Image: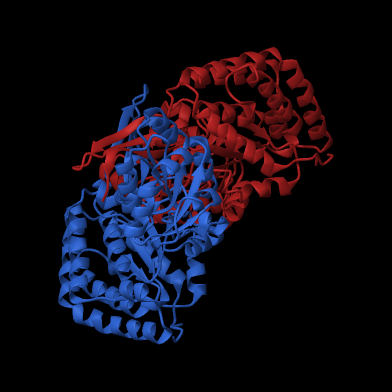
Chain colours: A red, B blue
Amino acid sequence: MTQIKSNVNVEQQAIEAKKAAKKLLTLSEAEKNEALHHLADVLEREYETILAANEKDLKNGRDQGFTEAFMDRLSLSKERVHDFANGLREVSELNDPTGNVLSDWTLDNGLQVQKVTVPLGVIGMIYEARPNVTVDATGLALKSGNAIILKGGSSAINSNQAIVEVMHKALEETKLPKEAVQFIASTDREATNQLFTMKEHVDVLIPRGGGKLIQAVVENATVPVLETGVGNCHIYVDKSADVEKAISIMINAKTDRPAVCNAAETLIVHKDWLEQHAAVLNEAFKQENIQVHADEHARSVIENALPAGHEDWANEYLSTDIAVKTVEDIADAIAHIETYGTKHSEAIVTEDDEAAETFMKLVDAAALYHNASTRFTDGGALGFGAEIGISTQKLHARGPMGLPALTTIKFLMKGNGQIR
Amino acid sequence: MTQIKSNVNVEQQAIEAKKAAKKLLTLSEAEKNEALHHLADVLEREYETILAANEKDLKNGRDQGFTEAFMDRLSLSKERVHDFANGLREVSELNDPTGNVLSDWTLDNGLQVQKVTVPLGVIGMIYEARPNVTVDATGLALKSGNAIILKGGSSAINSNQAIVEVMHKALEETKLPKEAVQFIASTDREATNQLFTMKEHVDVLIPRGGGKLIQAVVENATVPVLETGVGNCHIYVDKSADVEKAISIMINAKTDRPAVCNAAETLIVHKDWLEQHAAVLNEAFKQENIQVHADEHARSVIENALPAGHEDWANEYLSTDIAVKTVEDIADAIAHIETYGTKHSEAIVTEDDEAAETFMKLVDAAALYHNASTRFTDGGALGFGAEIGISTQKLHARGPMGLPALTTIKFLMKGNGQIR
């Protein structure tokens, strides 16, 4: 693939984004919503331009022998472009997360204090080869009054550039400055690295993608980061777990969408339960074509299991493989999660409420489940509307991040000469 | 000063802190409050131990010729130790910030969702030579269910170590594990640097001190940081500003406590107002012994003003010096703040509500004031109780940070077998 190094001046783009962010502060919710609808209409109208650019990326992808799953995520169609447009229309329906007075009070001296939500300013979005993020993230940013700098994966660069060009054309026909959407049209890693340290112009970086991408951002950025996504999730089947619930939750969490971050990767199972229910578990693995990687004890009762080691406990399979770990008790299970979990989503299956409470209290993760599948850690499933990602960090936002995660607050004080 | 390099194993300390943080999750609010009261009592009882250690730091300080202001912050007395103890008692009275259900709802499939506040876990506190932070930060951490790792300035190391030893002794007589309070007893910079990257064991770093300290943390840390404190604050006196309000707000913001972060450093003044009210402004500067550093235009009307340049606009004086900048209009004023401000506290003095609204909307800072002094950006003044610092960043917490800034959330889901 040719490296595209066109005359990209990332700092200049960031300065323009910052300026556009100021302009966004002066616009009304109606103006932002109208712009989102217009973006949607123009994307639908210009879908052929987008598909032509996408064809170039697909050709590059085929030439480089990318996997089918990768090509599937990269591939656009008229229908997918319509889905993007409808996503923008849905975002326009969500409540404006800015301008909310979270609290207000008056000091004894008469100074009036308001704590009000405001946009973050400029968001740097760094993501892999999913062109839908280009549209989704732009919609969420604009709705929340933020400018956005997009840096997508290089294998989708033609698709992304075409999408942004169409969006720019559309924005010119709205009240929103088109400079509010900046696209880094370069596959040069230096361009991304510049973004990492532009504290003056960029308010937050949101990396979306695999562990390596996120790690690179966290290690190199001085701009604050909202970490998203890696989910090494566990289902712990406790001694008293109901068999039907345990099996159906495990199968759902593992197989419903194995490649997503809220899918389960390891089944932790109480040794008594395992011994008692090995047959039904074996049956389930077989029926669902799940490849098991198990510790020594579990291998003595689970059929066709490969040996599991550190790599199996520590990494996401993102496939229908599963690791199986036997434990003596709940403390063992919690310790295993503490060692290998990514603080995303963890589930316990048990009929013992006290065990459930211990699990909920002691396991450190964004989402904890008692007798339900980890697959519900998702902005859509929880009713947040669209999400910008799933935060696995503890500051600012944790778990699925909807529009409020793209805001900060200001204290606004009105006085008549108060001094201290 | 001798470098203390005793056998400090920061990683081991962080592991112990993490373990203690787990234990804290199982304690009740009453148990935490009892411990805070006991800490207070024992600190008061053992004040002589603390003062003896403090004497060593003071001697080192004198030997090294530290400034009077520095020595004043370092110096302890029986009264100051009593103040520390009372601070802990006050923290015990504050509402427990953990265990609050921020929202709860039930999905159509019956899955119950709760969004609940929980402690962050382990806080790394990095601060300069103010022994009071050792006690204040410990109190806030324990009240909010967090373990804390303290790394104070090397010039206060004997005082801090003595305070921590007394607190450890006290904690042994409570339900709280003494390992929840870790003290890095080293003046070795390597020890601090180790803290910066221990993402596995440390949940947040809070640097408190000058710009250089904060910069070092932000640049080197991979652990998330809550930035605090540098305040290059401005008072903008608009064309229509009331003279009395303008003068009294300017004097208060500049002179009440010049060394704190919410003090004003630059007076931005509309040229028409300046021309009309130069006499009264000169009188005020003279009466308050304020040394003015001004731009060329202001120097033509302000007496005894030194020329101001980039350094004056960009830095905090932290003294009764003030920079004066003349502007043509409010847009100029906002642009100056955008270039040189630190997003802390900014004020406009005006009788023009539209100008005030523009200022509140467009200036990007934690706290914005209309006709009041910037000195109110303070947890105590705003009624938050004790504060852990004043955040000048936008993520997680902005402005004065009370106990809620030391919490994160968990989504707790209760089901009966829900799958997706």
Give residue A289's position: percent from left, percent from top: 59, 35
Q: Quadrant of the N terminus of chain B?
A: bottom left
x 42%, y 38%: residue: B238
In which image quadrant can residue B321 be found?
bottom left
Give the x, y percent position of residue A261.
54, 39
Q: Nearer the viewer, residue B104 or B222?
A: B222
Q: Residue at x 82, y 38 (%)?
A: A64
Residue A352 vs A87, above or below: the answer is below
- Residue at screen point 32% across, 59% down: B288
Whether residue B270 can be seen here: yes
The location of residue A51, given as percent across then percent down, is: 75, 20
Left or right of A185 on screen, residue B60: left
> In the depicted view, which residue is nearer to us: A177 or A378?
A177
Q: Answer with left or right where residue B180 lies relative to residue A407.
A: left
Camera-nearest residue between A46 and A414: A414
Q: Nearer the viewer, residue B379 or B180?
A: B379
Residue A138 sits in which quadrant?
Answer: top right
